[in-house]
Image (cartoon, rainbow, N blue to C red):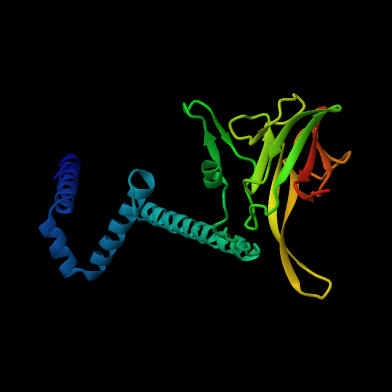
Amino acid sequence: MSHASSRRRDDYEAASNSIRRRRDDHDPDNDERRSRDYPSSRKYDDREHTRRERDHADGYGYGEREREKERQRDRDRYDRDRGRSSRRSASPRRRSGSRSPSPRSKKSKPNFGASGLLAAETNTVKSVDGKNSTVLKYNEPPEARKPVLAWRLYVFKGDEQQDLLHVHRQSAYLFGRDRLVADIFVDHPSCSKQHAAIQYRYIQEKDEFGTMKGSIKPYIIDLESTNGTHVNGETIPKSRYYELHASDVIKFGLSPREYVFLHEDAS
């Protein structure tokens, strides 16, 4: 055999072996048979398969290493969120614990006192036609009584007597410029609409023997008038009862009229 033919035969055998090996690599039956017959080659193939997967994941795909990294990131994120929520829930308790308890607000008790509305409605005096009305500033006290003596008022202007008024027929007399409510009308502009009132009161006092004795006495009260009420030249206190005696001279505001207080038995 020549050298050339021997060389062609060697090349043919090498090509046949290469084709056979390539076919065996792609044949699954051959892989199973080789792994059964040669255990060492099976271990080698498993390691080779693992390496190929790792290399594939590192180079091109999404492998076990990336999944592990993502799981670790999820754990870290969960731990951070849990710690933040626990701090938020604990902070209000610290604030509430450090703050001193506020004192309980006292409940306002109901006020059953008189508001004055009912009294104003009761004390309202209306005219006959109903167009005008006035609220009385004065109410008689419980000890109000009609007098026993026949008291009178002698009205003077200068030295001349102007009028005679009988003031014993009721327990009180109201003086003022408001004709709707005044019992005795005073028309001077310095006088108030409800200026003053004469009130007869039942008063109990001890006599010289220490025995309680009651009597009806006359008093005058100024109803907070603008220019005051005067008795014997002195201005009396406002909103207080001032006892009158026989022969007292009463003046209202700046009016020149004088009212002399007398009764029929006075000397």
Q: Left or right of 163: which side holds 47?
A: left
Residue lying furthest top in this view?
189
**Residue 154, horizontal then vertical, whole percent:** 77, 36
Q: Note whether 189 is above or below 212 in the view shown.
A: above
**Residue at (78, 42) in percent of width and height:** 261
Q: Note whether 51 is above or below 235 in the view shown.
A: below
Image quadrant assignment for residue 48: bottom left
Q: Left or right of 167: which side holds 111?
A: left
Image quadrant assignment for residue 173: top right
Image quadrant assignment for residue 74: bottom left
Q: Nearer the viewer, residue 36 or 267?
A: 267
**Residue 236, horizontal then vertical, whole percent:** 83, 44
Residue lying furthest left in this view?
29
Which quadrant is home to the N terminus?
Answer: top left
Quick check: can you spot residue 224? no
Q: Left or right of 185: which side holds 11?
A: left
**Residue at (34, 52) in percent of width and height:** 63
**Residue 134, horizontal then vertical, whole percent:** 57, 33
Q: Note whether 143 is above or below 240 in the view shown.
A: below
Q: Nearer the viewer, residue 140 or 115?
A: 140
**Residue 147, horizontal then vertical, whole percent:** 67, 52
Q: Left or right of 170: which side holds 2?
A: left
Q: Note whether 205 is above or below 258 in the view shown.
A: below
Quick check: can you spot residue 216? yes
Q: Nearer the viewer, residue 85 or 47?
A: 85
**Residue at (37, 45) in percent of width and height:** 59
Q: Nearer the viewer, residue 117 or 169?
A: 169
